[in-house]
Amino acid sequence: MEKGNLYSWSRRYSGLLKAVRTMKLVMVILALSANTLWASVSAQNVRMDLFVEQKSLIEVMDLIKQKSGYSFIYSAGDVEQVGKISMGVKNKTIREILDLALQGTNLFYSIEDDLIILKKTNVLAQQQQKTRVVTGVVLGTAVTDTLPGVTVMVKGTSKGVVTDVHGKFSIVIPEGDDVVLRFSFIGKRTKEIKYTGQKTLRVTLEDDSQQLEEVTVVNEGYQKIDKRKLTSAVTSLKMDDIMTPGMSTLDMMLEGRVPGMTFMQNSGQVGAAPRLRIRGTSTVLGSQEPLWVIDGIIQEDPVNVDPDQLNDLDFVNLLGNAISGLNPEDIEQIDVLKDAAATALYGTRAANGVIVITTKEGKVGPPSVRYSFGGTLSRRSRYSDRSVNVMNSAERVAYSRELLEKKYEYGDKNTWIGYEAAYENYRNGVIDYNEFCRQVDYYETLNMDWFDAIMRDAFSHTHTLSVSGGSRNAKYYASVGYNRQNGILQKEKGDRYTANANITLKFDRFDLQFKLSGNTQKQDHTPSDVGLTDYAYNASRAVPLYNEDGSLYYYPKKQNSSDIQSWFNILNERDNSYEKIKKNSVSFSTAINYNILKALKLGATFSYTVSNTDDDVYHGETTNYAKSLAKKNYAKDDFTDNGIGDHFASGSFRKATLLPYGGELKKNGTKNENWMARLQGSYYLFLDEAEKHMLTFMAGLEISSSHYTGLQKTFRCYVPERGLTVGNVDYAQYDAYTKWLTTDKQALGVLKDNLSNKLSYYGSLNYSYQNRYIFNANMRVDYSNAFGDRAREKFLPIWSTSARWNMKEDVLKNVYWVNDLSLKASFGYQGTMHSTQTPELVIIKGELNQAFGEYSSTIKNFPNPDLSWEKTMSINSSIDFSLFNKKLVGSISYFYKKTKDAFLTKKVAQVNGVTSYTVNQGTVENQGLEVALNINPVNTSMGGSRKGFSWRIDPQLGQVVNKLINKVIETQKYDPLHDDYTYLDYLNGTAHVSGKPLNSFYSYEFTGLNSDDGRPMFARTGEEYFEKYCDMPKSKVFTEVMKYTGCRVPYLQGGILNTISWNGFVLSCNISYSIGSKVRLLKLYNPDASSMAVSPTQNLRKEFVKRWQTSGDEKYTNIPGLLSKNEYSATLNPWWKSETYSFAKNIWEMYNYADIRVVSGNYLKLQSLNLRYVFSDNVCKKLHCNSLYMSISGTNLFTWSAKELKGQDPSSQSGSADKINVPITPTYTFSVNVAF
C-alpha cells in the first residue's frame, strides 16, 4: 500500500492523526519547518532525476535504491535477459521511472511497503523464425538534429536496441508481414511503424507536447515552468523556427512572429535597431522598450540613451540595444512575457514586457562540430524602383525652362549651375547660342545616377563554428562567430565577432553552470548630417558629379541662411567625414543549484558584465560642416588643391571663426559595469496521499548594480593626417574660437557618471489540483529612493494572481477530437519609477564665471517630493486549444492595461530655474486581442519518410488599441497635460492629447486650390478668426486649425508563415502585415525658401508635373501652381506669424502637413521566402558528415501598400523626418549548415 507524505508522517506520530485530518492546511504550514518530516518522507512519492546511458537493468535498480531507499526482489535470469537501458528523466516518481525502464520487456513490477518485486510475464513461446537486419536513423523535429538514446523495440517482443550518439540504429527483426517497430524517447511522441521491406528507415519523432510540458518548455527567467501549469501570457518561439538567413540580429527576426508585438523599423542602415512594443505603450515619459533577459540575467543597453530619443519614431538608433552583440546561432529559445503574471517577478522595469532568451547548452554524446555560413546580397535603390518617384534630367530642365521663361525669381544667382547657369551665361553673352544648345542638350540627357554614385549592391557574410558534447554529468557548448555586414551606402560596414562558452556540471545533489561570452563590434558610417540617402533622392539629375577630366565637380553652396559660401561635392563630404562606432562586451555568469532535500532546492546566481562603447564623429576641413564653423568665404581652389587654403589672410576671419583650420572630432565614450547576485529557494509538497493537491513555493533576494561612466568631448583643429593631432593656435588672435574653447561644455568635456543600485525581494506560490486547476500568485518589492519623503510608498509591491483550468483533464476528458483545451486568466499591478526625478534639488556645478568671478551652477532637476509611482493594472484572459489530432493548435487572448498616475511634464515659471516639472497626472489605456494559430492541413509523411508531403500554416494576429486619458479638468485658460507644446508637436505626433492614442498627429484641413493663382487654401485660417484665437489657449488653437488624421503606430500587426515539406525540400514563406497607421507623403516644399524657384541643384518629385497651371485645373489636381515673386513673398508673412499662438510658418508648410498628404500606412509584405534542401543520409555518409542542408532565401522582397504612396515605404519613410532614411531593400542569401 502506498503512503503519502502527510500520511506517513501521521502514522509514525499517531497522536497527531486526528489533527492532521482536521487541520491539513495548518499542518502544511508547520511542515515547512519540521525537520522530522524530511527524515520520514515516503520514498515512493518522492520525485527524482535519473540519467543512465547503456546501463544494465541491475545497475539501474541499484541507482534507484540509492536515491529512494527501496529494495528489489527479482530473478537474476529474468533480469539479465533485458538489454542495455538509456534514459534521462527529471522530477519523476518511482512508478514513472520503472514504467519507462521496463517498457518493451516481459517484466512487470509490484510495490509492497519498501520492496519492489519484479516478475516475468507469462508469454507463449515463440517459434523459431527467420530474421533480417534493419538499419536506420532517428531525427528530431529539426531535420538536422539526430536523436541519440531512442529506444527501438519490436512490438510484442522484448527485442530492442538504442540509437547511438548519431541517432543511428541496427536491429534484428523476424521475417513476416506483421512486424511493427516502436520508437520511444523522452519528450517525443512514441511512433509505431509497420515494416514493409525497407533496408533503411528514416524516422522523425515529433515533440510530445504533454511530455515536453512536463519537463520545461517556458522559461520566465526566474523559473522554468511546466507549460501545463502556465497561467500567464507567454509566447514561446524556437530559434530554429524563426531563424531568417540574411538577418544578423534576433530583434529583426521577430516581425510578424509574436501576437501583440508591434514592430517598427525606420532605417536600413547597418546596426540600426528596430523598435518593439509589447501590448502597446504603458508609459509616456519613460522608456517604452521591452526588457531583455538572457539566461535569467537582465541585460543593460550599452549606452544609456535618453528615453525621449528612444521613443522618437524618427530617431535612428545605431548604437544598438542590449542584444545587438548576441549571435542568433547561439540561441535556443525565446519567450515573450506579456502580462503582469509573467512579468511581475521582474519588478519596475517590466511594465513594457520582457523578452527572455535561452542560449544553447551542450548535448550528451561525443563532440559534435557544426559550421554554418550565409552569404547575403543586398540590393541598392534604383531610379526604376517604385519608391523613387522623382524627375529625370529632361523633366527637371523643362521645369527650369518654364520658371525662367515666366521670369520667376530665383534665390542667389551666384549658386546657379546646370541649365540656369547656361541660360544666364547665354543671356549675358558669355556663350553663344550654339554653345547654349550644346550645354542644354548635355543637361537634358545627363540623367546623373546618384544612387549608383552613393550606393552599391552589397555582399555580406556570416560564419559560426560551434562544438557540443559531453556526458550526463558534464556537458559543454562553445562557439565563435563572425559577421560582416556591408551596407548599401558605399563605405558603410559593420563587423561583429562573438565567442560563447557554456559548461554544465551535474552531480547527485547539485549542479553547476558556467557561462562566458564576449563580443566586439565595429561600425563605419557617414555622419547623419551629411545625408547621403537624402541627397541621392533629392539631388537634380541634371547636375554632374565629375568634370570632363574625371575630377570632382564642385558647385557653390550657401551655408544655411548666412552669406558664407563654399563649394560642394557629395563625394568630398563622404570621403572626408566618418562616424565610427566601436563596442566591446564581456559577460560572465555562474549558477549553482543544491537539492537540500528532494523537494527543497536552493540556488545562487551571480553575473558580471562590462561593456565599452566609443562613438567618434569626424568632419574634415573641406566638408560643408567644417566650413560652416570656419565662417569664411572659400575660393574654389582653397580646398581642391591642397585642402588648407589661406585661413590667416583676414583679421575679421580670425575673430569670427570657430575653426581656424583642420576639422572637428566629437568623441563620446561610455563604459557600463553591471553585476547581479541572486539567492533563490524553491520547495514543493503534496497535500494528500494520492498526490492530487500540490503546492510549490519560490522566493528570492536579488541585489543588482549598474554603473555608467564616460566622457563626451569635442576637438577642433583636428588634423588626422598629421598624426592624429589637435593643432595649436594663437588664442589672442581668435576671439570666437578661444571663447568656445574655454566656455563651451563640449569643448571642456562632459563627464558621465550614473550609478543605479537596487535591492529586491520576490516570491511565487503555485497550487495545482490533478493538473486540472492551477492557481498562481507572484509578488516583488523593489526599493527606490527616487520618490519623495511625502510620497505614500517608497516600496511598491508589484503583484499578480492568475489561474488556469485544463478542461481536457476534466470535463472534456473523453472528447476524442479535443487534444487540449485550457482557460487562463490573470490580474496584477506593476509600477514604474522615473529615473531622473528625486525629492531633492539636483544642480550641475559649472565652471568659473568670468563676468562675476564666481563659480556658477545650473539646476538639472527641480525637487519633486510628491512624485509617486506610475502604476499599471493588467488583466489577461485567454484560451489555449489543440484540436483534431493537433491539426489545429492555437491561442486566443484578450488583454486590458491601464496606467494611472502616468508621468507627464508640466510647464512652470522660469523663475524656478527650470521650465518644466514632472507630475503624476496622466492615465493611459491599452487593450487588444491576440490570435496565434498552428494549422496542419496535410501531412502524409509516414515515419519521417522523405517521400511524404506536409503543409503547415502559422497565422499570427495582434491588435492593440491605445488611448491617453486626461484626469485634469480642462478650462479655457488652462492647458491640460503638457503646457509647452508647439504646433510642430501636434503635426509630428509628439503632443499627448487627451482621448487620443499616443503618437497621434494632426494635419491642416486642405480646402482646395485658389482658382486665380493655384495657391493652397486651408480651413479656419482666415483673418476673421483673429479675435477668437486670442481668447483661446495655444493647444485649443492648434486643434481648432488642425484636424486629427491618425496615429503613426499601427493597431494591428501580424504574420502568416507557410511551410511546405516534400522529399527533403522545405519551402517557407512568411508574410507580415500592418494595419492602422497613417503616413505623410514626402514633403514637396521648403517653407524657408525665399522663392518658389527651387535651387538648380535640387530635384523635384514627379507630382509637380501635374501641378496647377491655369484656372480650372483645381478641379483635377491638388498640386499648387507657381506663384509670382510678389505673390509668393506675400505668403511668407501670414497674419498669424507674430502671434503667440502661431500655428504655421506659412501656407507651404501647411501644405506639406495637409490632410490630403496623409495616406494609409497599411501594408502587406513578403518578409521572407526560403527554400531549403536537406541531404539524405547516404549523401551525408559519402561526404563524411552527420547532416547537411543548403538554402536560398530572400527578405523584404515586395511590399503591397496604398497606391497614393507611389512606392514610398510606409514602414521606414514616415514623411515626418527632416531627411529620407536609408531604405529597407531586398536581400538574397545562400546558406550552408553542416554537422560532423
Image (tube, rainbow, N blue to C red):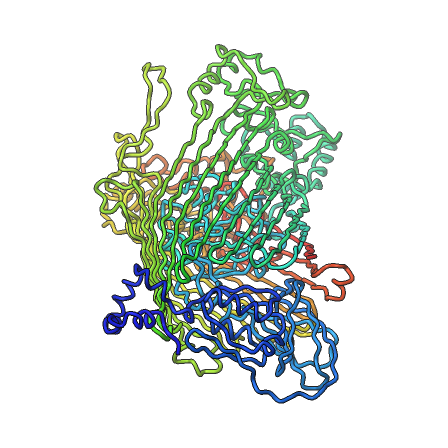
Does the image show residue 550? Answer: yes
Residue at (40% x, 40% y) in the render = 705
- For the C terminus, give its image quadrant: bottom right
- Residue 28 coordinates in the image, percent (x, y): 29, 65
| Residue sitting farthest toward the left | 790
**Relative side of 268 to 1159, left or right:** right
Residue at (67% x, 47% y) in the render = 461
Residue 165 falls in image quadrant: bottom right
**Relative side of 925 to 930, left or right:** left
| Residue sitting farthest toward the right | 1182
**Relative side of 347 to 1174, left or right:** left
Q: Nearer the viewer, residue 698 or 113?
A: 113
Q: Is residue 1140 above or below residue 221?
A: above
- Residue 803 coordinates in the image, percent (x, y): 35, 67
**Relative side of 97 to 1196, left or right:** left
The count of marks equals 0
- Residue 231 coordinates in the image, percent (x, y): 39, 65
Q: Nearer the viewer, residue 813 or 51?
A: 51
- Residue 604 coordinates in the image, percent (x, y): 42, 49
Residue 195 falls in image quadrant: bottom right
Residue 452 falls in image quadrant: top right
Does the image show residue 413? Answer: no
- For the N terminus, give its image quadrant: bottom left
